[in-house]
Image (cartoon, grey):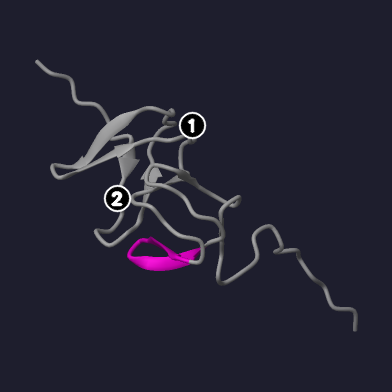
Amino acid sequence: MKRLQAAPVLLLHPTDNVLVCCRAVRAGERFDISPDEALHVLQDTELGHKLARRALAAGEKVIKYGAPIGSMTAAVQAGGWIHLHNMKSDYIGAHTRAARVDAT
């Protein structure tokens, strides 16, 4: 009997241009996303991080859950790691959410 393996990535919505890693993936891995779509991982990427489903240009919206979550700050090829080094939130600055208490 063939053992089922967990998918290495998850496509959360059909219009997403990113995939979420369900485990750490390593550069050089290749796997099918669907019967018509495959992905070649370009660099080691940790659990929970995103991979580009297709090439994305600088300034292009990052789509996750079928909605924009930010914009690319640098281009990335399909299978490339997407994180704070090459994308930014369009809504709040990353790591700038400091607690603030106004003196009265």
Q: Is residue 91 magenta?
A: no
Query: Which stretch did the figure color magenta?
Result: 60-71
Quadrant that contains the C terminus:
bottom right
Q: Quadrant of residue 6?
A: top left
Taking 35 as reference, is 88 left or right? right
Please state which of residues 63 and 12 is positioned toward the viewer in this rendering: 63
Q: Residue at x 27, y 62 (%)?
A: 15
Crowdedness of circle 1 by 10 Å Cα count: few (<14), some, many (20+)?
few
Determine whether the residue tagged by mark 2 lies in a helix, strand or loop. loop
Mark 1 and mark 2: Cα distance apart in space: 18 Å
| Residue at image point 50% right, 66% down | 59
In the rendered image, residue 33, in percent from the top left (x then y), is placed at 23, 42
Q: Amino acid at mark 2?
A: Leu
Residue that carries the numbered disc 1 in the rendered image: 44
Q: Which residue is mark 2?
A: 11
86 vs 102, nearest the viewer: 86
In which quadrant of the rendered image does the N terminus lie?
Answer: top left
Horizontal and vertical percent position of residue 73: 56, 60
Identify which residue is drawn at 71% across, 62% down.
96
Earlier along the polypeptide chain: callout 1 or callout 2?
2
Q: Secondary structure at mark 1?
A: loop
